[in-house]
Structures are given as C-alpha cells and as structure tokens.
Image: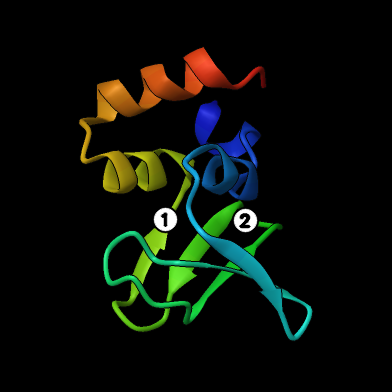
Amino acid sequence: MLRNHVPIDTVIALLNIEARIAHNLFRFRCPLCGKFHTAVEQNTNLARCFDCKQNFNPIDMVMTAMNSSFIEAVQFLEDNINP
C-alpha cells in the first residue's frame, strides 16, 4: 500500500534529497550515483536515474538513501507519512 500511496516526490523531500525543477521536470540527486540525470513519473509513482539506470519506488528510495532494510524503510514511511 505504501508503495503506491506515498508520492515519490514527497519521499524525496522527506529524505532531504536535493531536488530542483529543470525544463519543467522534477529532478533529484540520485542517492546512488549523485547525478541529476533523473526524472519522476507521477502516473506510476516511480523515479529513475538515467545514469545508473536504477528505478526507485518510495520504499526503494528510502532503502537506498538510508541504507536500510525493507522492513526499516516501511517503518520509516509509516512513522513519517500519513497516507
């Protein structure tokens, strides 16, 4: 449920991941490679880094940014977001 009901851009902000609007697109600094060659797809609630070719859903983003387990990431989202 969290994967689809917590907006990925909200998760990026919650994690204090650097983000900006470029060419009318929401971009974020990839937590894996550190580059801004990224995009967010609101319809699927996924984020993608085109440099390291990684897709992130909200749980994946927390796991990667916080170096946490799946269970820890779910708990973090449950504790910090009211879906």
Mark drawn on residue 10: none
Q: Nearer the viewer, mark 2 or mark 1?
A: 1
Q: Quadrant of residue 20?
A: bottom right
Q: Describe the element under mark 2 as helix, strand or loop.
A: loop
Location of residue 45 in the rendering, given as x and y in whole percent from the top left corner: 60, 51
Query: Above or below — where is 24 with respect to 11?
Result: below
In the displayed structure image, the side of residue 7 where residue 24 appears, left or right? right
Q: Quadrant of residue 62?
A: top left
Name the residue carrying label 2.
44
Mark drawn on residue 56: 1
Lower position in the chain sequence, tag 2 or tag 1: 2
In the displayed structure image, the side of residue 16 where residue 64 appears, left or right? left
Location of residue 69 in the rendering, given as x and y in whole percent from the top left corner: 20, 30
Determine the CA span between mark 2 and mark 1. 11 Å
- For the N terminus, give its image quadrant: top right
User: What residue type is disc 1 on?
Assistant: Phe
Residue at x 32%, y 47% (from the top left corner): 65
In the displayed structure image, the side of residue 47 where residue 22 appears, left or right? right
Callout 2: 10 Å neighbours few (<14), some, many (20+)? few
Q: Describe the element under mark 1 as helix, strand or loop.
A: strand
Q: Are marks 2 and 1 in contact (CB under 8 Å)?
A: no
Location of residue 75 in the rendering, given as x and y in whole percent from the top left corner: 38, 17
In the displayed structure image, the side of residue 14 where residue 34 appears, left or right? left
Query: Above or below — where is 74 with respect to 31?
Result: above
User: What residue type is disc 2 on?
Assistant: Thr
Residue at x 29%, y 39% (from the top left corner): 66
Residue at x 64%, y 32% (from the top left corner): 5
Residue at x 54%, y 20% (from the top left corner): 80
Location of residue 60 in the rendering, given as x and y in whole percent from the top left corner: 36, 45
